[in-house]
């Protein structure tokens, strides 16, 4: 048994509860109201443990949602983040399952987002995109589904086109060297690079003549 001896607001919408003179747990203001806690109230050890467990679970949910607020994340990314924050595996598993049910974590949606984002802002080869997704913990079947229709010729052309403004004043040999190196760093193969670089040199030459 324990007696609630003090209640303090800490930060926004959070309340710290003291049991027998010592800080015992911190919970959301809404949970505080739901439990009907007040100074002088006696709580069983079982009740205190239950409230603490629920508070830790909610803290873990909040940490996951904060992490997800910046951009979509894979399940593995969220799991690693929460474990680094010190949450135990049991709690992390429950939070992950809850967020998956709510579609807040969806590896298929994440793979689609990651692929589209890369193709729009930083085009890379299909092989490199597949590697990035696997490193994010995405299952092979999902990776294959989201990348199967990618065309490296199109991707390399778009990637190179974004880089052309740096090459406009170069002679042919330097143009080829710089653009070839650029595309290699993005994972494109020799045959694709040869075709795309030749095409862009031809287009640029015609445009300047």
Image (tube, rainbow, N blue to C red):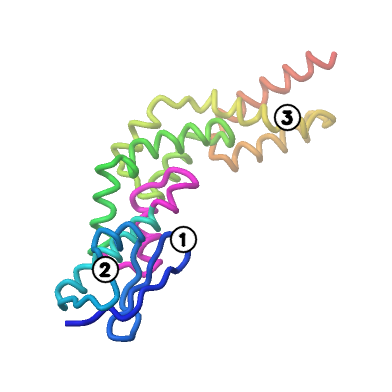
Residue 70 image label: none
Nearer-the-camera pick, 10 or 121: 10
Of labels 2 and 3, earlier in sequence is 2
Helix, strand or loop for disc 3:
helix
Q: Which percent across, then down, holds residue 5?
A: 31, 81
Across the whole image, how many numbered discs are drawn on residues?
3
Q: Residue shown at 72%/37% (left/top)?
A: 177
Estimate the spatial distance between the alpha carbons at disc 2 and disc 3, rounded to whole Å. Answer: 66 Å
Q: Looking at the image, is 41 positioned above or below residue 143? A: below
Q: Which percent across, then down, holds residue 185?
A: 60, 43
Of labels 1 and 2, earlier in sequence is 1
Image position of 200 (left or right of 41): right
Whether residue 170 appears in magenta in the rendering, the answer is no
Residue 164 image label: 3
Crowding at mark 3 (Cα within 10 Å: few <14, some 14-19, many 20+): some
Q: Which residue is mark 2?
A: 37
Question: What residue range appears in magenta?
Answer: 65-89
């Amino acid at each position: 048994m324990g007696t609630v001896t003090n209640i303090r607001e800490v930060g926004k919408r959070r309340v710290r509860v003291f049991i027998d003179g010592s800080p015992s747990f911190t919970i959301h203001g809404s949970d505080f109201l739901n439990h009907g806690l007040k100074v002088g109230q006696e709580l069983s050890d079982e009740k205190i443990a239950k409230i603490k467990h629920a508070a830790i679970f909610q803290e873990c949910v909040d940490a996951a949602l904060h992490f997800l607020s910046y951009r979509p994340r894979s399940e593995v990314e969220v799991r690693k983040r929460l474990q680094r924050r010190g949450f135990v595996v049991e709690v992390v598993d429950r939070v992950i399952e809850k967020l998956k049910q709510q579609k807040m974590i969806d590896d298929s949606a994440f793979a689609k987002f990651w692929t589209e984002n890369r193709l729009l802002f930083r085009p890379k080869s299909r092989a490199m995109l597949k590697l990035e997704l696997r490193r994010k913990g995405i299952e092979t079947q999902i990776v294959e589904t989201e990348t199967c229709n990618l065309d490296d010729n199109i991707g390399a052309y778009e990637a190179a086109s974004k880089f052309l403004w740096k090459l406009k004043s170069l002679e042919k040999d330097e143009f080829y060297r710089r653009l070839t190196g650029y595309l290699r760093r993005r994972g494109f193969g020799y045959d694709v690079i040869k075709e795309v670089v030749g095409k862009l040199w031809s287009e640029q030459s015609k445009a300047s003549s």
